[in-house]
Amino acid sequence: MAGMTGMGGPPLMMLYEKLQVKKDTVRGCNAVLSVLQFRVIAYALTGSFTRDDLALYVAVSVAGLVGLCLGSHLASRMDQATFSKVMVALMLLCCVLLFASSAGLTGS
């Protein structure tokens, strides 16, 4: 879906919320896509990913794995209703950040 819209998070979260997808399914799909990072292979093959980028990629990968472990711990303590509320809160936060970015209110 990110390829159609240019942003993966909010549209997928809206879809998950609308279809009432179980939290373990959402977490499993997102974990596979986030941890495996198939894009890096394509970036390396096309020359978009260089040795200079390696330290940054490793740091971001480690941070992602820490987040995955923390998320697994929190998810075991969260019921489906709370998970849905968290998804809605994240959607709202993403929307605010996207609008702020498009309005030039962020640093980049």
Image (tube, rainbow, N blue to C red):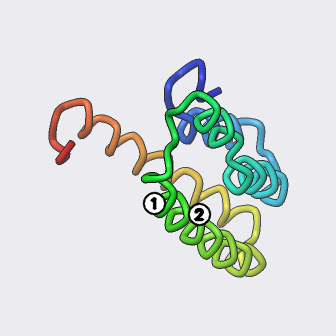
Q: Measuring 58% from the left and 28% from the top, which residue is drawn there?
A: 46
Quarter residue 61 falls in: bottom right
Q: Image height check: is 5 above or below 107?
A: above
Nearest the camera: 91 or 59? 59
- What is the x, y in percent for residue 103? 18, 31
* Quadrant for the N terminus in the image: top right
* Dot 1 alpha-carbon crowd within 10 angstroms: few under 14, some 14 to 19, many 20 or more: few
* Dot 2 alpha-carbon crowd within 10 angstroms: few under 14, some 14 to 19, many 20 or more: some
Q: Residue furthest top?
A: 4
How many discs appear? 2
Q: Measuring 76% from the left and 63% from the top, which residue is drawn there?
A: 80
- What is the x, y in percent for residue 38? 71, 41
Q: Secondary structure at mark 1?
A: helix
| Residue tagged 1 | 56
Nearest the camera: 90 or 28? 28
- The amino acid on which the numbered mark 1 sits, given as a three-letter code, is Leu
- The amino acid on which the numbered mark 2 sits, given as a three-letter code, is Ser
* Quadrant for the C terminus in the image: top left
Find the distance from the CA under tag 2 to the CA under tag 1: 8 Å
| Residue tagged 2 | 61
Residue 75, numbered circle: none
- Please name which of the two marks, 2 or 1, marks the residue nearer to the observer: 1
Q: Measuring 24% from the left and 40% from the top, which residue is drawn there?
A: 100
